[in-house]
């Protein structure tokens, strides 16, 4: 009897056909909206594998209703949407999609840095509202990138790539990480420092830590006050890493220069105060949103499923 795979939303790359060619039955939730928990439980109750999104909450209740499931393949590098420990206690393997989205996410982080430094959001808004009256010496003055200090919070794959890209702008690199990154130091002459030192001394701060119990509100009202008035902070990691309400407060008070967001604390809901601020640049969680990257992510999720259902080890286990 063929094994069955449920996919919580249609993914790029036509992986349904790929999985079917490898001898599996696939079923996909084909509506534009997110699947509800009730629908997910009903549709995945008797499947052998589940491919899910970061926006699908795979908690104990869902896992308890996965009667035959051998693998949960998360279509994301992060996996804070899944109760991984509980899944493992039920002998369900959890996988993610690391590496394949590193470059795309690093590119978005740099794009946000440039947008914030040069006030591109305000410039675009000015043009669309037809308020541009001609060149002026003080029109939308921003900051040079060259010679600035860039602080990388989380020196994993993505943080390293952001640092390499920013070094090309002739910057100095600081980084905060649990462990020393010798490759990063070799490639960029980066210096490992404490979080407080990084926040106090960086002109540009880019966040790249996963969301865990220890990183929830890693940036908070106690340490964000250390940032320079000219500081730019960009988050392409997870929204909950920052105390968003306090960050909004200091943005309103112009205690830092600007901030760039690709992720939000209560995603997909966005704090309405953010929408009113001109010194922020907002993106809809598109860090990995290139055709090539999203297709590779889907294919990696599919390959993890195939390996596990054939009795082999997963390619990228959590």
Image: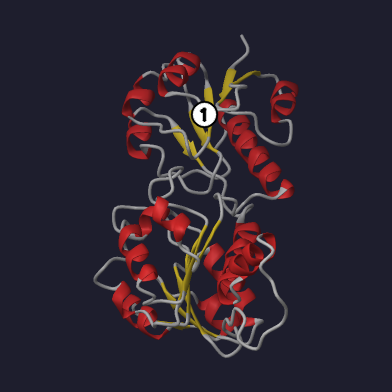
Q: What element carries label 1?
A: loop
Closer to the camera in the image, 49 or 291: 291
- What is the x, y in percent for residue 136? 67, 85
Position of the N terminus by quadrant: top right
- What is the x, y in percent for residue 195? 34, 75
- What is the x, y in percent for residue 273? 40, 56
What's the residue at 70%, 36% (across, down)? 12
**Residue 66 visible in the displayed image:** yes
What's the residue at 62%, 63% (across, down)? 125
Going by the picture, which residue comes out furthest to the left?
222
Going by the picture, which residue comes out furthest to the top?
1
Closer to the camera in the image, 149 or 277: 277
Closer to the camera in the image, 78 or 46: 78
State whether residue 234 is above or below residue 317.
below
What's the residue at 29%, 76% (across, down)? 225
**Residue 215 visible in the displayed image:** no
Name the side, left or right, on which 96 lies relative to 168: left
Colouring used for the render: secondary structure
Residue under pointer 1: 34
- What is the x, y in percent for residue 269? 43, 43
């Amino acid at each position: 009897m063929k094994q069955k795979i449920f996919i919580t939303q249609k993914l790029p790359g036509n992986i349904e056909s790929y999985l079917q060619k490898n001898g599996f039955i696939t079923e996909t939730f084909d509506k534009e909206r997110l699947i509800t928990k009730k629908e997910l439980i009903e549709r995945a109750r008797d499947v052998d594998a589940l491919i899910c999104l970061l926006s699908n909450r795979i908690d104990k209740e869902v896992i308890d209703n996965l009667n035959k499931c051998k693998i949960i393949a998360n279509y994301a590098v992060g996996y804070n949407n899944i109760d991984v420990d509980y899944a493992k206690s039920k002998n369900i393997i959890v996988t993610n999609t690391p590496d394949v989205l590193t470059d795309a996410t690093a590119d978005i982080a740099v794009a946000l840095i440039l947008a914030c430094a040069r006030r591109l959001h305000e410039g675009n808004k000015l043009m669309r509202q037809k308020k541009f009256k001609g060149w002026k010496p003080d029109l939308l003055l921003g900051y040079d990138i060259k010679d600035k200090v860039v602080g990388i919070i989380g020196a994993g794959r993505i943080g390293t790539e952001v640092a390499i890209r920013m070094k090309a702008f002739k910057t100095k690199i600081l980084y905060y990480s649990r462990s020393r990154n010798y490759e990063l130091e070799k490639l960029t002459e980066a210096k490992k420092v404490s979080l407080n030192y990084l926040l106090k001394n960086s002109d540009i701060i880019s966040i790249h830590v996963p969301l865990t119990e220890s990183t929830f509100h890693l940036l908070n009202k106690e340490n964000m006050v250390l940032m320079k008035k000219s500081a730019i902070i960009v988050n392409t990691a997870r929204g909950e890493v920052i105390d968003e309400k306090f960050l909004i407060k200091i943005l309103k008070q112009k205690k830092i220069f600007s901030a760039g967001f690709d992720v939000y604390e209560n995603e997909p809901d966005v704090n309405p105060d953010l929408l009113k601020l001109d010194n922020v640049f907002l993106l809809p969680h598109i860090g990995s949103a290139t055709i090539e990257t999203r297709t590779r992510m889907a294919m990696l999720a599919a390959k993890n499923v195939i390996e596990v259902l054939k009795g082999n080890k997963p390619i990228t286990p959590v």
